[in-house]
Amino acid sequence: MENLDLAYLSRAEVWLLANLLVYFLMNGAQIFETLVLVPKWTAAPPSTFSYLSDKNGVSLKTFWTVFHSVHEVIFMVSIAFCWQLPTIRNWLLVLFTLHFIIRVWTLAYFAPNIINFQKMAAGSLSPTPDLAEKANAWKKRNYLRVAMFVAISITILPVLFKLTSLQ
């Protein structure tokens, strides 16, 4: 590690900081959505599913697909730029693995369910008798998912501080 120059450490720091900033932006959007939008569309399904309709503005699907994709790339680039720093790299690999597990859960559970809710809002899928329970379960699990994303991003802070202390 003594062969690493200041330029390498600076690039590693910039990419890790970019990772953290995008993560915090994503968390802010998730918290806003969780506290403002989710209670509205889960209030009285299926009538409140109209909040999920793309006709009301920007598509949430497009927004989250782009946001998460950009963040995934930045997260991986930050790992690549920290690769020669074993402690930093190992922490980032652990955090990325946890992040990835939550993303898989998102793609396996949250995305398909919200797509079905959107189809119900559009009238292309009939509501089921247990719809209110499904929407409420989605909302409660979303609280946990958002909390886990926030916890991971906060855990990046000490990793960044460790990196800055190497200079």
Image (tube, grey):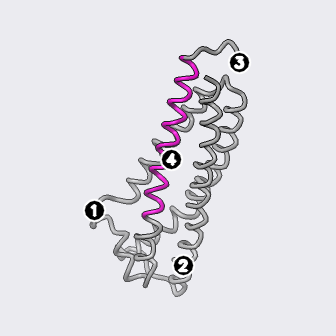
45 left or right, relative to 4? left
Q: Secondary structure at mark 3?
A: loop
Question: What residue would you read off at disc 2?
Answer: 136
Majority secondary structure of magenta residues: helix
State the image quarter where residue 157 is shown.
Answer: top right
Question: In the figure, 50 relative to 70: above or below?
Answer: below
Mark seen at residue 44: none
Q: Amino acid at mark 3?
A: Met
Q: Amino acid at mark 2?
A: Asn
Q: Secondary structure at mark 4?
A: helix
Mark seen at residue 23: 4
Range of residues picked out in magenta: 7-32
Q: Residue at x 59, y 60 (%)?
A: 108
Question: In the figure, 56 relative to 89: above or below?
Answer: below
Measured as percent of width and height from the top left, residue 47 is found at 37, 83
4 left or right, relative to 115? right
Question: What residue would you read off at disc 3?
Answer: 1
Q: Residue at x 55, y 72 (%)?
A: 138
7 or 64, which is in the foreground?
7
Cα–Cα gap, marks 4 and 3: 28 Å
